[in-house]
Amino acid sequence: MRLMTHVRRSSDGGFEVRIVVPADLRSTIGKTNLTRRLGRLSKSGANRLAAPVIQQFHDLIERAKAGPLDDPSPAPVSVATLAPPSKPSPRQASSPKLMAIFDGYLRERQSSPATIKRWRPVITHLVDHLGHDEPRSISADDIIGWKEALARQSASGRTIREVYLAAAKVVFAWGVENRKLDANPAAGVSVRVPKRHRPRGPSFTSAEARTIPSASLSRDQSKISREQALARRWIPWMCAYSGARVGEIAQMRGRGIIEVEGIWAMRITPEAGSTKSGQARIVPLHPHLVEQGLLRVAEQAGDGPIFYDPARGRGGSAGNAHYKKVGERLAMWVCDLGVDDTHVQPNHGWRHLFKTIARRAGIDPEACVIAKSRIVLSMRM
């Protein structure tokens, strides 16, 4: 029996059971449809209460097929089976909607625009799937049903676990911590993901690592903007020599190149755009970057960004920042060079290569510091 075929939303926002009476039996039963309201409750709760009602409706239809009915009304359902929803307590009646809890979490957490952009569709998807925005009515079964629906929609197990369930767990947990909810229905719900098979490591090979910097020195840049040419020319070198993320370099401003105790360095700061941890750090510039003329390029940019022109963009937004487009274009260019193995990220491969070489050189602690981006690097070289 497929319950969801017969359970639907009622006009008051609750659920009801509705079965269409076959045309040849409508005169016998006296109705076109058989309908029974279930009340305002969760989808899973409605499904449970609907089962005996659907069965009795089907029984009535079967009796009508046998001949005239003495009493065309469906047999009454016991009060115990279809007990009306309990009257909500004052706290329940005033409990916030799920989206309001999500917004409260964002305000307190001061989440980055990237997090908001990634998580808001997740919570919206959950609300759309459930058909309501009442967090106190959401059960663990509802979350499991959502997880299964995502899988049917071809979302990968890793995405379900690390994006959808992760976002839901954090938001519900915040609601519990702030006494807006009594329980976290997503707690304990997970997805078992098979270990990813990697046919190769995530860093560039020696040949790939030579191809990109060599191409960056090409003087044939007539078909692209000055800022794009600068991005191709400098970002691969800066990533290779620092282990920094491409987004951290792409957002670099001219004033971010500084001198500390006689050593040139770059200041990576969330004020310019974004960092993974939200923490600023100072990374020494390799002497080769100085020799190639990076200081002159930074001086020309001044207080503005080095690798994009804000005036040339179409406004952008915190969630779709200019520097992200710089990274996307750079990745496309790297792929066009033939460095297009799908198992290696065209920009992030530098970061993995840097850590690999650092370990070979016996400086694993420093590599870990850069990888985690938690403290300022020592300026002694």
Image: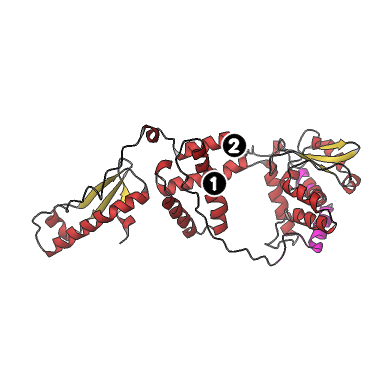
- Residue on which disc 2 sits: 109
Callout 2 crowding tier (Cα within 10 Å): few <14, some 14–19, many ≥20: few
- Disc 1 residue type? Ala
On the image, which quarter does residue 206 sit in?
Answer: bottom right
Q: In the shown orientation, is residue 228 left or right of residue 294? A: left
Q: Position of residue 131 (x, y in %)?
A: 39, 46
- In this picture, which residue range is highlighted in magenta? 200-229
Q: Which quadrant holds the C terminus?
A: top right
Q: Position of residue 310 (x, y in %)?
A: 70, 37
Q: CA distance from mark 1 to mark 2?
A: 13 Å
Q: Is residue 274 above or below residue 329?
A: above
- Disc 2 residue type? Arg
Check the image and tell me how it is coloured: secondary structure
Report the front residue among 19 and 328: 19
Q: SS of the residue at dot 1?
A: helix
The extreme bottom residue here reads 199
Indicate whether residue 292 is drawn in magenta: no
Residue visible at 24% across and 54% down in the picture: 53
Indicate whether residue 222 is drawn in magenta: yes
Q: Is residue 91 above or below residue 56?
A: above
